[in-house]
Image (spheres, coloured by chain):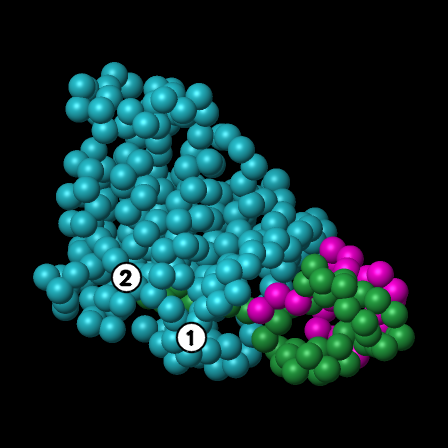
Amino acid sequence: MDFTEEQLLRYSRHILLPEVGGKGQSKINAARVLMIGAGGLGSPVGYYLAAAGVGKIGIVDDDKVELSNLQRQIAHSMDTLGSYKADSAKATFEALNPDVNVTPIKKRINRDNIFDIMKDYDIVVDGSDNFPTRYLINDACVIEGKPLSSGAILRFEGQVTTIVPGKGHCYRCLFEDPPPPGLVPSCQEAGVVGALPGIIGGFQAMEVLKLILGKGEPLINRLLIYDALKTQFRTVKVRRNPQCPVCGENPSITELPDYTQDVCSI
Amino acid sequence: MKIRLNGKLIEAPDDITVSNLLTSLGIAEERVAVEVNLNIIKKKFYETHVLHEADEVEVVNFVGGGSV
């Protein structure tokens, strides 16, 4: 694409990088990223992707902004209390960068609508807050062959990984089935420290940019675990499981199953 | 015997099972995934899977929240 003078200035620090340059910046501007969740993780992911100039961002979230969100969900503000998070985030990101087109999708994602929602996007970001949605997104991405950045946070622990179907592991290779309902608490039940999603979401945004640029080594076959209290990182190597029910050699999940379980979200 | 747990060398009783290791660490089985030498151990084998000297064990918590 031909950059305007304003764009050359806006993206100058990217264009200076040999790994990005004008070509890479054009790729970023042409990229289409779907974010599921506009909360703790979605806020920083969307902020940095919008700042970087990702041309089309879809945000799926049917939730509204509450005061208890503002301790960590930095895309929202006192001015948007009570409005849809997807709308609030759209206003924030588009105010940061008018090159970015944000589509708010005020729906709860499920097995009946996920393929239709995903079809307009090249990369998916999971910033969801419950296990059924996490497995739904993983399975749908594997079936459709869409790269996925998966992040999760609870209390002082964060996890992030990158799933590129056909190139490495998927979420089910590591966690084959969801934990029994109610056993693993949600952030609402157990708390989460406010800066943690900024760190994990920052990793997710970085991974998405690398996928767009085709540069570096994404977190494929690796799960990065961050312990905020100890300020320690641990990288767990993960292998694609040939017996994985969704990405293995003889998958038993070829259509999206019913993910209904006790959804402890929102 | 020595095993590597989450990247750190620790002393563990000989022939300890995955299940007993988790119990000794005070970890509920349902809240984690366990990998031994890069292979994920299915939960139904936790009680029978015996660990050996120099095994590399990773215990990974289920973390589901994005805090929407």
Tell me if I can see residue A233 in this picture. yes
Q: CA distance from mark 1 to mark 2?
A: 16 Å
Colour displayed for chain B in the image of the structure: green
The answer to which quarter of the image holds residue A126 is: bottom left
What secondary structure is marked by label 2?
loop
Q: Relative to A192, say whether A23 is above or below.
A: above
Q: Which residue occupies 46% across, 36% down?
A: A210
- The color chain A is rendered in: cyan
| B20 with respect to A178 (left or right) | right
**Disc with the residue nearer the chain's start (1 vs 2):** 2
User: In the rendered image, is residue B64 in sight?
Assistant: no
| Few, some or many residues within 10 Å of mark 1 (<14, 14–19, 20+) | many
**Left or right: A51, with B52 as reference point:** left
Q: Amino acid at mark 1?
A: Ser
Image location of residue A239, percent across then percent down: 69, 51
Relative image position of residue A90 (x, y in whole percent): 20, 49
Question: What residue is shown with label 1?
Answer: A186
* Left or right, A154 with reference to B34: left
Q: Chain of mark 1?
A: A
